[in-house]
Image: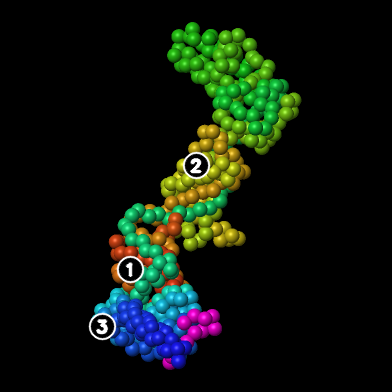
Amino acid sequence: MLPSRSLRSMAMPAALVAVLVLFVTACGGGAQTSAPPERKVLFYRNPMDPKVTSPVPAKDQMGMDYVPVYADEAPPQSRTESRKVLFYRNPMNPKITSPVPAKDQMGMDYVPVYADEATPQSGTESRKVLFYRNPMDPKVTSPVPAKDQMGMDYVPVYADEGAAQGQGIPGLAAVEVSPEGLRLAGVQVVAAVREPLARTIRTVGTVVPDETRIRHFHTRVTGWVEKLYVDFTGQYVREGQPVLSLYSPQLLASQEEYLQARATAARFASSDLPEVRKGGEDLVAAARRRLQLLDVPDDLIAEIERTGKPQRDITLLAHASGYVTAKGIYQGQQVDPSMMDLFTITDLSTVWVEGQFYEYEARAVHLGEDAVVTLPYDPGTRLAGRVSYVDPTLDPQTRTLRVRFAFANPALALKPGMFANVELAVDGHEGVVIPDSAVIDTGLRKLVFVSLGSGRFAPRQVTLGVRGNGKAEVLSGVAAGEEVVVGANFLLDSESQLRAAIAGVSGAAGGPR
């Protein structure tokens, strides 16, 4: 009996201790597990694959808890309560969507697509969006806003784009591009300005001597060359410099006649008859004139008068300064007036450059126009000249026009036979000028795209005048101050054709190009 009583006495304290422990645990647990108002869980989804869901808590193959999806999570935190979410799309692949918030395999949140996003921010409420198309492949479209694989927004296509501004051009329509699209496409604009403009014609010319400065040296009597002072081709000769000494019986006889005429005139000078005195003077003048016409120098005639004796050899002098470009005699050679020439002396202080121009350039070349010549071997040398002659006929073989330019050549930089680059500025005047790269030449018409602001561009057909040096004169179609597209304008042209085709603007697809 004693042992059983002892067991009962030991069991009572243990029961009391257990009750106290349960009470304390209940109180503490209640404090630790106090939760906010109860949230309704719709389901649980796999954190790595949102398509896999579970109606009860679960774990994936890696031991990660499934994420609860609550009923109040459908409206995202980034929007207002008044915006209706149509669905959620994968940020990297817009084709993958989800009816509830989700994450992709990289942990990025799906992007909500709202019902009111059919009207883009850049447009007005009255513009109706037909659909959205891929900016890089217009054949790919979407009924809702989307992004392509490069992250570029799909471009909205509006119902009113067929009647956009600046039109009147069959097959084209105005284009609207988002700021991001402008940046990615590299669209650049430049303002049209009014400035002087001239077209530059370039050709290759050949340096030739100035024909008006070429002199031939001949003898007017028959004789023999006793001494040759100019004895090689290329030698420089100054006017009045001795060229050769010539023995000529004809010159010797003319000197004797001159001395006899002087003696006769001296006797007639004492006559009382004026006619006789004048006859003697005329005889001397005629004999002296004969010597001069035979190229006897005045200094030699004066020496003959002083000594009273004729000179056996007569030294002939150069008639002009220049370089000996041809030589046809040698010392001791017999010469006579029938010989073609003894020397050719050419003055190279001024030379000609003869260039060839095509038929379509002929109308722009006129006498007196300024030209600049540069040398292939010395690009730093620039010589100024002008058009001195335009050939009245074309070369029948090459169908080109020969034009001559005159250039001063004091340093002999231009040597006959050289090639030279000639630049001729023609059609100089002032007008509205745009970069030549802004023009799209289709063969039948010339187009530019004009910026209307806010990412909108309108096609314009233009009439061009002078084109040169990377610039083009606009006769009609663009006014000074308007901005034209100079970069990526071929993309805008393709976009414009597509939009016009979509809108069916005057049978745009079949319009002239």
Mark 3 sits on what residue? 81
Between disc 3 and disc 1, the foreground one is: 3
Q: Name the amino acid, label 2.
A: Arg
C-alpha gap between disc 3 and disc 1? 39 Å
| SS at mark 1 in the image | strand
**Which residue is painted at 33% across and 71% down in the image?**
455
Q: Quadrant of the N terminus?
A: bottom left
Q: Name the amino acid, label 1.
A: Ser
Instruction: Report x, y in % for residue 39.
Output: 32, 86
Residue 341 visible in rendering: no
In terms of sequence position, does the residue under pointer 2 or pointer 1 come before the other? 2
User: Which of the 4 image quarters holds residue 467?
Assistant: bottom left
Is disc 2 in contact with disc 3, using a CB cutoff of under 8 Å? no
Q: Compare residues 161 and 179 and report the one nearer the observer.
A: 179
Instruction: Report x, y in % for residue 110.
Output: 41, 80
**Which residue is painted at 50% across and 16% down in the image?**
281
In terms of sequence position, does the residue under pointer 2 or pointer 3 come before the other? 3
Instruction: Report x, y in % for residue 500.
Output: 38, 82
In terms of sequence position, does the residue under pointer 3 or pointer 1 come before the other? 3
Mark 1 sits on what residue? 451
